[in-house]
Amino acid sequence: MAHFEKEIGKRIRRLRLERGYSCEELAVMLDINVEMMNLLEQGKMRLFVDNVSKLAIIFDVTTDYIIYGLDGKKQNYYARLTDE
């Protein structure tokens, strides 16, 4: 998988640990099995759109944070790309 998926996985894992959820607990919340949860966190599986929304609700972050790592402020992703 691409670097993009690995970064998403890192964010999910960091949020899960910060919130004190086990991998099993988060898998149940997302209605997926633990193996899939592990693959998501490792960046070896793509995140389904419906799970992006669920994760944003569970972790109280924006979907932009889950996907792009934006801090939740109203930022334009494309403007950020041009700044880098």
Image (cartoon, rainbow, N blue to C red):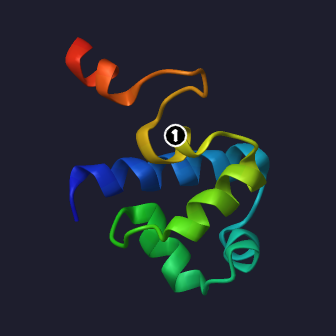
Q: Is residue 47 left or right of residue 29?
A: left
Q: Farthest top residue? A: 83
Q: Front-most of 25 and 84?
A: 84
Q: In this image, 33 relative to 9: left or right?
A: right
Q: Is residue 2 placed above or below 44 in the rendered structure? A: above
Q: Name the residue under label 1.
A: 64
For the point 73% across and 48% down, which residue is it? 59
The quarter of the rendered structure image containing the N terminus is bottom left
Which SS class for mark 1? helix
Q: Quadrant of the C terminus?
A: top left
Please tell me whether residue 64 is drawn above or below residue 47 in the rendered image.
above
Observer able to see residue 84:
no
Residue 13, how many percent across, how many down?
Answer: 56, 54
Residue 47: x %, y % from top left: 45, 67
Residue at figure coordinates x 64%, y 46% from the top left: 15
Q: Quadrant of residue 51?
A: bottom right
Report the side of 58 relative to 67 (left or right).
right
Residue 34 in the image: x percent, y percent? Answer: 59, 82
Residue 59 visible in image? yes
Give how far across and how far down residue 82 sits, in percent: 21, 18
Question: Is the residue 77 above or below the residue 15 in the image?
Answer: above
Q: In this view, does 80 lie above or below 62?
A: above
The amino acid sitting under disc 1 is Asp
